[in-house]
Image (cartoon, helix red, strand yellow):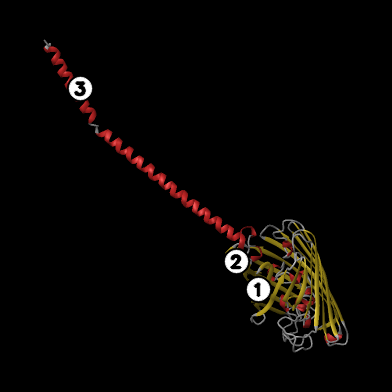
Amino acid sequence: MTNPKSCIVAAVAGVFAMGACAFAAEPSASDLKIQQLEAKVAALETKQAQNGKDVAATIDQVLRDAEKRSQLLAMNGDSGAGYDNGFYVRAGSFELRPGVLFQFWNDTRYRSDSNDGDKNNHFDNGFEVHRLQFILEGTAVSKDITYRFNWETGSEGGSLALEDAWVKWMFADQWGTRMGQFKELLTHEWLTNDGYLLAAERSMVDHALGGQFLDRTQGVTLVYGGYDKGNPLNVEIGFTDGLNQDNTNYQSKIAPFSVAGKHSFDFGVTGRAEYKVMGDWKDYKDQSAMGTKSDLLVIGGGFDWSQSGDGDIITAAIDAQYEMGALSIYGGFIYRNADENVLGGDDDSNDYGLVVQAGYLLNPSWELFGRYDWLHLDNEISTNNGGEDNFHEFTVGVNYFMGANGSAGHRAKFTVDLSYYPNGTPGGIFDTTRIGATGESTGDDEWVLRGQFQLLL
C-alpha cells in the first residue's frame, strides 16, 4: 500500500517542476530587448559588408578609368588649359601660350639751353602707355616646331603693328630653320624680349646703332643648337631683305630712311653666335640675376650686312653676360660702317659705341642697377654750340618685383631709373626718343626720370 506522505511529496515536486519549465519557456522583457538589439547589429553588419563591397567596386572602377586615361595621355601628350609661368592651352603636341605685355610710363625730362622760343631750359612731364603687346607663341604639329606672333601698340600713334611673325622647325637633333619676320641678329640686349630688361629701356647705344636702327627684317635662317641645354653653342645665320624691312614686300624700292614701311634694300645677311662657358641657357633670357641658381657666362657676337644699290651698311657687335649669385653684368660693343651711297652724303660714316651695365639683388624683391654707355659718331651733329660727335648716358635705378618675396618676377614689377646725358642725345637716323629722351641734341645736358609699371601675363 502506497504511503500517503510519499504521494503528497511527489505531487508537490511535480507542481514545482512544471512551474520551473513554464518560467524557463517564457523569456523576460530584458531578454527580448537583448535579442532585438542583437538582430539589429547583425543587420547593420550585413549592410556594412554590402556597402564595403560597393565602395571597393567604385574605387576599382575609378582606378581603371584613370589608368585608361593615363595610357591615352601617354600616347597623345597631356591636354588641357591652365597657368604654368603663363597661360596655356595644350592638346597633344599643340600648345598655345597667349600673352600680354603692358608697360605704363611716367616720363620727366629736363634739358638745358633748349632754344625753344622764350624758354632757355625745358621741363616736360607726362604719362604714356609705352608698350602694349599681344603675343601668341607655342608649339604646333610637334614639339620641334615653335612659333611666335606678336603685335604692339604704344606711345607712337597708338596703332597696332605687327612685330614678330616667325616659325622655327628643328628638323634634326641640333639643326633647324626659322622663317618669317624677326629681329636682326645683332646684340643680346636687342634680342632680349621687351619684358625682361634690366632698366626701363635699352641703352642709347643699342637704340642708335643696334636694335632701334636695325629693327626687324624678313628672311630665312639656319639654326644650330637652338639653345639646347646639352649644347653650349648656339648659332643662327640667315638671308634677309636687309635691315629695318619689317612689314614690307620686295616691291616699291626707295632710298633708305626716306619713307618708313617701304622696301629699301636689295638683300641682307645677318647672323649671331653664342657660346655658353657655364650655366643654364634659361637664365640667359633676361638681363637680371633673379632666379639664377648657378653661375652663368655667355659670350656672343652678331653682324648684319645690308646692301642698297651701290651702297652697303655693315654692323657688327660683340657682348657678354655674366651672372653670379645676386650679381648680373652685361657689356657690349657695336660698330657700324655706312657708305655715302646709302647715307646720301659726301663721306662714309664709321660709328661705334660701348655699353656696360650691372644689377644687384638686395633681396628677392629689390634690385639696384646702373649703366654707362658711350656713342661716338664719325660725322658731327649740328648743335647750338657748334657740333657734337660724342654722347654719354649715365643711368641708375631700382626694380621692385611684386608678390611674396618677389615671386611675380618680371610678370609684375615697378622700375624707376634716372638717366643723365651731359651732351644731350642725337636725333635723325640715330633717333633716341624711344628711350624717353628728346632726340634733339643741343650739346647741353639732359636729364630723364622714368617710372614704369610692368604687367606681363
The x and y percentages for residue 163 are 69, 77
Q: Quadrant of residue 178?
A: bottom right
Considering only vertical position in the picture, is 313 above or below 139? Answer: below
Q: Which label sits in the foreground, 3 or 2?
A: 3
Give the mark nearer the N terminus: 1 vs 3: 3
Tell me whether the residue at label 1 lies in contact with that at label 3, contact meaning CB atoms closer than 8 angstroms: no
Q: CA distance from mark 1 to mark 3?
A: 111 Å
Instruction: Determine the secondary structure under disc 1.
Output: strand
Neighbours of disc 3 within 10 Å: few (<14), some (14-19), many (20+): few
Which image quadrant for residue 173?
bottom right
Q: Farthest residue to the right: give it.
A: 347
Q: Residue at coordinates 58% horizontally, 57% vertically from top-left?
A: 70
Q: Secondary structure at mark 2?
A: strand
Mark 1 residue type = Trp
Q: Earlier in the sequence, mark 1 or mark 2?
A: 2
Q: Position of residue 423 (x, y in %)?
A: 80, 76
Regarding residue 103, the answer to whether it shows in the image is: no
Residue 360 x, y percent position in the rendering: 73, 60
State which quarter of the image contains the N terminus. top left
Q: Which residue is mark 2?
A: 91
Q: Nearer the viewer, residue 321 or 353?
A: 321
Label 3–label 2 contact, CB within 8 A: no
Q: From the viewer's perspective, is 402 left or right of 306?
A: left
Q: Note whether residue 209 is visible.
A: yes
Q: Which residue is mark 1?
A: 105
Figure quadrant of the C terminus = bottom right
Look at label 2 and name its amino acid.
Ala
Q: Position of residue 272 (x, y in %)?
A: 80, 70
Front-most of 150 and 291?
A: 150
Q: Which residue is mark 3?
A: 17
